[in-house]
Amino acid sequence: MIGRYSRQTLFKGIGEEGQRKLGNSCVVIIGCGALGTVIATSLVRAGVGEVRIIDRDFIEYHNLQRQVLFDEDDIRNGLPKAIAAERHLKKVNSSVEVEGIVADVNYTNIERFIHDADVVLDGLDNFETRFLINDACLKHRIPWVYGGAISSSGMTMNIIPGETPCFRCLSSTAPHPGVALTCDTAGIIGPVPFIIGSLQAVEATKVLVGAEEINRNLIIFDVWKGTFHRLKVSPRHDCPSCRGKYEFLEGKFGVRTTSLCGQNAVQVLNPEVGELSFKELAARLKAVGVVSYNEFMLHFSIDSQEMVIFPDGRAIVKNTTDESLARGLYAKYIGT
Ligand SMILES: [Zn+2]
């Protein structure tokens, strides 16, 4: 199979030795939206031995603008993203062991998904799960590559346990829900995740082949303004994760969901949240759905989905008993 990769083994940074290392490696991609599809495409084509993709969502038409692995047939067939990705990628490179897993990654299952990974890649759209990846990867000493994309800008950073600052050094807490932009409220243009996902894939490749040129800075760009920056991140001496306190992995923080018995609704609770500003939240949500509020609650509906949000950040997602779906909607429209 080595001839298949001749154009990248000619490249000195990889070579035949590097190609063998790629072939013996396992990568885990958490989240298979825009970033995840770019990363997975790149690494499967490059001949990484085992690619595990975990995602909890189904494909919708508004994903096709930027989620490069999916097509209209996948939507007609009602496929979850992880399964559609696996099917497409197996056709691209049958020598790679591609595994799509439909799951909501949380503190109870993340270690099972990543324990044997050589590198973990972040294809997520929420901070909470990134803090969880950070804890799990520090604990298991696995390098991971952060990537974020929104509107016309993106950022990426490598977290190499014991060598670089971690994600919690970079951002000590998640942005306040209701303030954080999400792709579902601020929008995103396709080229941004293409660039970030490609940078993440190349950094993962460098980690896997043992290259010295691994990036140790935070890269931030805005494709609309045409700006590109590399920033040095300092380790935070009081960072709990770097000191071995894995609070997110212990389930100490983070969003909790409870199915409300007999009500066909799920409550989503974020213990980190203080007071929400309904005025700001309503201004953002009005762009995508129908919003009304008084001082006690904010009512938001989009298509067949309905949420009631309370000032303490608690939300009730109606017309479902699926806790994973409810968490997803919360992350999408309220943030974190
Ligand atoms: Zn840290």
Image (tube, grey):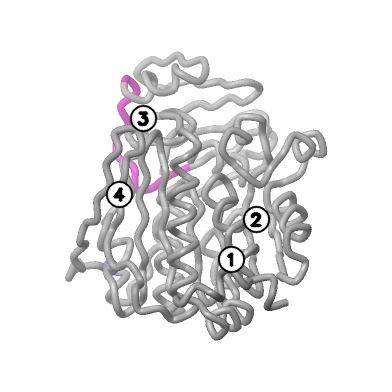
Residue to which mark 4 is pinned: 220
The N terminus lies in quadrant: bottom right
- What main secondary structure does the magenta stretch of the protein show? loop
Q: Which mark is residue 103?
A: 2
Say whether disc 2 or disc 4 marks the residue closer to the N-terminus. 2
Across and down, in percent, residue 201 comes to: 50, 61
| Residue plotted at (33% across, 49% down) | 174
Helix, strand or loop at disc 3? loop
Identify residue for label 3.
311
- For numbered disc 2, what is the local secondary structure? loop
User: In the image, which is nearer the foreground, mark 2 or mark 3?
Assistant: 2
Which of the two discs, 1 and 4, sits closer to the camera?
4
Q: CA distance from mark 1 to mark 3?
A: 30 Å
**Residue under numbered circle 1:** 109
Give the magenta part as a residue range. Answer: 269-279
Q: Residue at x 66, y 33 (%)?
A: 60
How far apart in space, not on screen, are marks 3 and 4 (Cα)? 33 Å
Q: Quadrant of residue 292?
A: top left
Three-letter code for the amino acid on which mark 3 is drawn: Pro
**Image height check: is 178 above or below 94?**
above
Q: Amino acid at mark 2?
A: Ala
Q: Separation of disc 2 and disc 3 at Cα?
A: 29 Å
Residue 325 visible from this viewpoint: yes
Q: Are marks 3 and 4 in contact (CB under 8 Å)?
A: no
Q: Quadrant of the C terminus?
A: top left
Can you give x and y, in whole percent of width and height, for residue 203 in the image?
A: 43, 66
Asked whether residue 70 is drawn in magenta, I would say no
Q: Of the two numbered discs 2 and 3 on the same chain, state the one appearing first in sequence.
A: 2
